[in-house]
Image: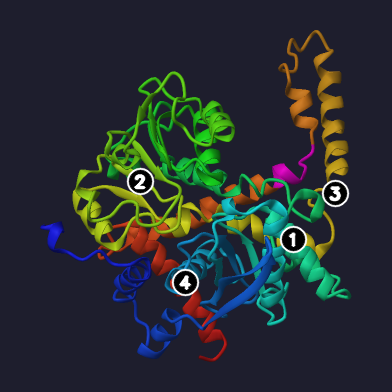
Amino acid sequence: MNTATMIEPSFRESVDMMFNRAVALMDLSPGLEEKIRVCNATYTVRFGVRLRGSIHTFTGYRAVHSEHMEPVKGGIRYAMGVHQDEVEALAALMTYKCALVDAPFGGSKGGLRIDPREWEEHELEQITRRFAYELIKRDLINPSQNVPAPDMGTGEREMAWIADQYRRMNTTDINSAACVTGKPINAGGIQGRTEATGRGVQYALREFFRHAEDIKAAKLSGTLDGKTVIVQGLGNVGYHAAKFLSEEDGCKIIGIIERDGALVSKDGLEVEAVRQWINKHGGIKDFPGATYVADGASVLEEACDILIPAAMEGVINLGNAARIKAPLIVEAANGPVTAGADDILRKKGCVLIPDMYANAGGVTVSYFEWVKNLSHIRFGRMQRRQEEARHQLLVDELERLSADKHLGWTLSPGFKENYLRGAGELELVRSGLDDTMRSAYQSMREVWHGREDVTDLRTAAYLVSIGKVAASYRAKGL
């Protein structure tokens, strides 16, 4: 294949091409296929904010891809590269992602063309509140219609501003906290939301490694323990994924790629130390105890067991796909592998765990936060102590029996403390996320291994999710 003569599809075209590949294997009417494919609506807003002595005009978007279920759900990103096609492609991915993990939402996405690093915090607040105002007054932020979340360039701080803006404009809405997810804990957020997408990547890999057939397909063996990993992007997603995989599953992070280059170490990098260095110095350069590579993108092509692109779309493309050596790629970012690169990698025998599944941890825990806000009570509040009391009865009986010297046994160290502790919100959130990632993987795996015309997980994921969206539309009478 001569990749030099091929034209790289845009992100939007990549999503459409992958959609087309899946629906070609489905029995959908042309009308229903078109209804699922198209973006229902995109709103473009241009607003002015007086800053630094003059009026600055900003352009923002909110795309709604599918309202087969409502509210629609999807993040808001702040980046200079935001444009309509990107937002619409991301909204489509959100539709399929929510369907795959059984989150009862349609797909949406928002974006503001801004570099958040260029503005002071109080200026960003003014800009965010004005953007939110423009969307709220058109019901493009609403607990029952459209629920944003953080994305690239935004976080819990921006979500708190948006929630407060909604509350100011809807003073009698008792469910106002549910208008947005990813909020700080003290503003209606939920334990485990910040780590959710990275934690979901970890759970996705754990589930993959439970199946010998799947491990063999990726030309790997054994467990996660000792596997070498390269992570591209040490933002919220990449940081948590790398941290959990290295600290809890025994993976060795041998490469970290950032904006200003990459760090490589065959002995493994300490993720927390790298993160602290970036926070202090603004980049990874001069980090001690590792080799610095100025051309960070080249490290994507280094040998490793697992490659985790966790930042931008299109980082693995026609230009470098043939040189990628990792047998297993986990798409922690949205669209990091283009459609053209996907073809090359599949023909090489590389296994890709697709973005619509691998990074679904964020929307899954956002769903839990939305439910918490609507129920007005945190998870575990009513049952935790009752759970502990029941456990105490069993422990008391075991301790009574262990005191009998004739039986000759005692409780293991730490058993009592661990068993007595009832599940709080964080434990319940992690449990729900783990269950969701396992169930979604099983649904993809059944299609991957059960149909001869499906040879990869991405096509399987699209088939599962499009099938669910189609069933919802049919139930509406379409």
- Cα distance between the residues tagged 3 and 2: 39 Å
Residue under label 3: 381
Bin the neighbour count of mark 4 within 10 Å (Cα to Cα): few under 14, some 14-19, many 20 and up: many
Residue under label 2: 329
Question: Picture quarter containing residue 377?
Answer: bottom right
Q: Of residues 335 and 205, which is closer to you in this image?
A: 335
Report x, y in % for residue 100.
50, 64
- Give the position of the N terminus as an image quadrant: bottom left
Residue appearing at x 45%, y 53% in the figure: 333
Q: Nearer the viewer, mark 1 or mark 4?
A: 1
Type of the residue with mark 2: Ile
Bin the neighbour count of mark 3 within 10 Å (Cα to Cα): few under 14, some 14-19, many 20 and up: few
- Cα distance between the residues tagged 3 and 1: 27 Å
Residue under label 1: 161
Range drawn in magenta: 422-428
Report x, y in % for residue 280.
59, 31
* Residue 463 appears in view: yes
Q: What element carries label 2?
A: strand
Rendered view: 127 above or below 281: below
- Cα distance between the residues tagged 4 and 3: 36 Å
Bin the neighbour count of mark 1 within 10 Å (Cα to Cα): few under 14, some 14-19, many 20 and up: some
Looking at the image, do the residues carrying marks 1 and 4 touch, with CB atoms under 8 Å apart?
no
Type of the residue with mark 1: Trp
- Cα distance between the residues tagged 1 and 2: 36 Å
* Residue 175 appears in view: no
Q: Nearer the viewer, mark 4 or mark 3?
A: 4
Type of the residue with mark 4: Ala
Q: Is mark 1 on a helix, strand or loop?
A: helix
Residue appearing at x 69%, y 80% in the figure: 139
